[in-house]
Every structure is written in structure tokens, then in C-alpha cells.
């Protein structure tokens, strides 16, 4: 039976010394006695609530530092939340950790393989931790090594593996005890295109077996290709949630035109807003503007004429069709890769 995942108002605040030159994003708390260096609170999750349906591929999309890895850390019992609750199936993550660990498989953002073991030994030992019998774990290890194209390297120490091979082995290890929920934290980061396609095929196959998959990514193509639903997170909370199709359809007008002028003025932005088909205009900086519109290329001659009449030369244009990147730009004003 497929298992779902749920969080309710998750909050996580880290305490650490302020880094040199720290700017926004940190909340200083002065010591009550006034004699010690103030502590700094770093909010990683800020009331994050999610419901991942049993048997679906769900994505957490957002830039570095958005709270994706912290969310996975909480759900996999590695990070204790400051407040809020999380469940894997009917099990409270922090009250029933042993039961939760039997239900989940985890692939961390960076491989944490034992370099003193061979690839096959890593899989065998992992299965043994979960009480899987000798024959079954040997058969399963052989099958997964073949699936991940690692059979020829099965008896070699992993210290000589490439990054892509280590990532494949990490995913195979997470699957050894046949978990009901598979967590993948940035699974395709640093992978070559061929390995990425192989990984996507394996994720889809695992999902087709009735398993729940939660992956974090800042790769829009990956989220669009794999996820049935996703949540875009930033600063520790959800800013948009739904299917990729529905989220892209929610962008005003659909098209995003990123414009740059030699001389941008408030009057120029107002004139852009008045053009037929333009839904929304936002100043990007002192020389740029983001225009959300019902049409793309056909608007450029009108924009160029308008800019010339206003004494503002149009120097650069970038047009993009509806995408998850555009959605994130609309909500936050910055790129997913920032």
C-alpha cells in the first residue's frame, strides 16, 4: 500500500555565530547578561506545510538556501524541527523514528559512501541493516547493480568511482530495502546528460511500482519532466503549489519579456503597461523591466517604437514562453539559480 507524506507548519531555526560581513537573513539575539557575543538565528523553514499523496512523484523546487534540504532532513529524521509536525504515512517522524526509517530510502545531496567497501558490499551491508535475508539481499544487489549499469564495477572500491557512478550507487543503496517513500535531494546535480536520463527512467519505473517519490531540485526541466505535482519554496515557505501545467498557466499572460533600456523611467513603464496584450510590468532594476504579456515577438516592434519616442533606447530583449522559471521570477523577482 502506497504511503503519503505530510508536514504541518514546520519551522526550523539554526543558531550560529554571525559570519563575517553578514547582511540580511540573520536575526541577532543579544545575550540577556550582555557579556557574551550575540547569537544569530538563521530561519531555514518558516511554517512549511505540505501534503504529498501516496504514490506520486512530488518535487520541491527552489534556489539554494530555500529550505529544500532542511525539509528532507526533517522528514528523514536527520534534522529536528524547532516546531511543527511531520508524518510518513500514519507515523509521526519524531515520535516513531524506527518505524519511519523502515519506510523510507534517502539519497543525500552529496554521496556519503564508505570508501573502504566495494560497490556490492555497500549494497549488501545496507540490506543487512534492515534484516533482509542473505539470498534476497544478494539477488537484490545484483539486480540493482545491473539496473544502474554498475555490474562491471561491483567488486571495485568506490573511491575510484566518478561522481555520476557514486550518485547511481547511492540511489541503488537507498532502494535496497524496497522503501515505500524515496527521498532524492538534488539527484541529478553534476550528472552528465546520459546519466541524468538513466536516472529519470529509474525514478519513473520506481514510481510505477506504486512508490512515493519526493525530490528536491532547482532544475526546472527535471521538475517539469518528472513531477506530477510540485511546490516552489523560498525563504522556508511555500510560494506556489500545484501541477507543472497549472503553475505555468498561472503566469500573467504566459510570456515573459525581459527588457533592457538605455534610460528607463516611470513614464516608460506606464506606457509599456498600456500596450495591448500586456498584463503586468515590473521594474527589474534601474535599466531593466519584466513584461508579462499574452504575446511575445509581435510586441517587440511596438516596444521599440515606444522606447524611441520616450528617448529610451531598447538595448536588449529576452523572450521566454511559460515555464517554472518564469513563475518563480513572477513571485520572487529573481532567478531560481540565484
Image (tube, rainbow, N blue to C red):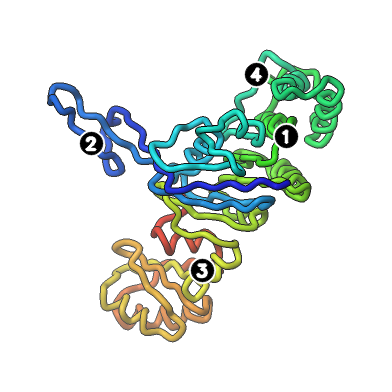
Quarter holding residue 30: top left
As displayed, is residue 116 above or below residue 74?
above
Q: Position of residue 87 (x, y in %)?
A: 55, 42
- Sequence-wise, the earlier of marks 4 and 3 is 4
The disc at residue 175 is 1
Question: Disc 2 designates what residue?
Answer: 28
Between the C-alphas of marks 4 and 3, the distance is 47 Å
Between the C-alphas of marks 1 and 2, the distance is 42 Å
Nearest the camera: 48 or 217?
A: 48
* Labels 3 and 1 touching (C-beta < 8 A): no
- Sequence-wise, the earlier of marks 2 and 4 is 2
- Residue for point 66% across, 51% down: 54
Circle 1 packing at 10 Å, graded few (<14), some (14-19), many (20+), is many
Q: Residue furthest left?
A: 34
- Sequence-wise, the earlier of marks 3 and 2 is 2
Mark 3: secondary structure: strand
Circle 2 packing at 10 Å, graded few (<14), some (14-19), many (20+), is some
- Residue for point 23% across, 36% down: 28
In this rendering, does residue 222 appear at all?
no
Question: Disc 4 designates what residue?
Answer: 114
Front: mark 2 or 4:
2
Q: Relative to 162, is 36 on the left or the right?
A: left
- Sequence-wise, the earlier of marks 1 and 2 is 2
Question: Disc 3 designates what residue?
Answer: 319
Quarter holding residue 81: top left
Amino acid at each position: 500500500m502506497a504511503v503519503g507524506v505530510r508536514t504541518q507548519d514546520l519551522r526550523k531555526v539554526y543558531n550560529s555565530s554571525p559570519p563575517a560581513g553578514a547582511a540580511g537573513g540573520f536575526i541577532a539575539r543579544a545575550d540577556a547578561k550582555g557579556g557574551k557575543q550575540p547569537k544569530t538565528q538563521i530561519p531555514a523553514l518558516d511554517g512549511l506545510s505540505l501534503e504529498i499523496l501516496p504514490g506520486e512523484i512530488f518535487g520541491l523546487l527552489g534556489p539554494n538556501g530555500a529550505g529544500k534540504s532542511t525539509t528532507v532532513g526533517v522528514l528523514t529524521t536527520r534534522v529536528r524541527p524547532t516546531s511543527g509536525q511531520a508524518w510518513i504515512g500514519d507515523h509521526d517522524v519524531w515520535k516513531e523514528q524506527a518505524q519511519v526509517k523502515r519506510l523510507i530510502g534517502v539519497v543525500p545531496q552529496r554521496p556519503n559512501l564508505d570508501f573502504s567497501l566495494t560497490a556490492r558490499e555497500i549494497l549488501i551491508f545496507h540490506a543487512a541493516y534492515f534484516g533482509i535475508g542473505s539470498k534476497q539481499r544478494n539477488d537484490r544487489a545484483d539486480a540493482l547493480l545491473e539496473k544502474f549499469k554498475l555490474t562491471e564495477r561491483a567488486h571495485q572500491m568506490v573511491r575510484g568511482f566518478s561522481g555520476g557512478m557514486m550518485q547511481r550507487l547511492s540511489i541503488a543503496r537507498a532502494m535496497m530495502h524496497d522503501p515505500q517513500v524515496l527521498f532524492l535531494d538534488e539527484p541529478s546535480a553534476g550528472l552528465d546528460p546520459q546519466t541524468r536520463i538513466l536516472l529519470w527512467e529509474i525514478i519513473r519505473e520506481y514510481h510505477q511500482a506504486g512508490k512515493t517519490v519526493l525530490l528536491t531540485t532547482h532544475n526546472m526541466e527535471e521538475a517539469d519532466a518528472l513531477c506530477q505535482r510540485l511546490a516552489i519554496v523560498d525563504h522556508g515557505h511555500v510560494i506556489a503549489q500545484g501541477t507543472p501545467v497549472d503553475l505555468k498557466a498561472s503566469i500573467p499572460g504566459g510570456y515573459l519579456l525581459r527588457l533592457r533600456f538605455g534610460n528607463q523611467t516611470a513614464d516608460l513603464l506606464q506606457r509599456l503597461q498600456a500596450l495591448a496584450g500586456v498584463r503586468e510590468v515590473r521594474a527589474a532594476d534601474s535599466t531593466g523591466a519584466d513584461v508579462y504579456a499574452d504575446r511575445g515577438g509581435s510586441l517587440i516592434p511596438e516596444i521599440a517604437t515606444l522606447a524611441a519616442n520616450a528617448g529610451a533606447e531598447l538595448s536588449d530583449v529576452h523572450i521566454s514562453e511559460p515555464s517554472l522559471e518564469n513563475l518563480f521570477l513572477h513571485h520572487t523577482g529573481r532567478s531560481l539559480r540565484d
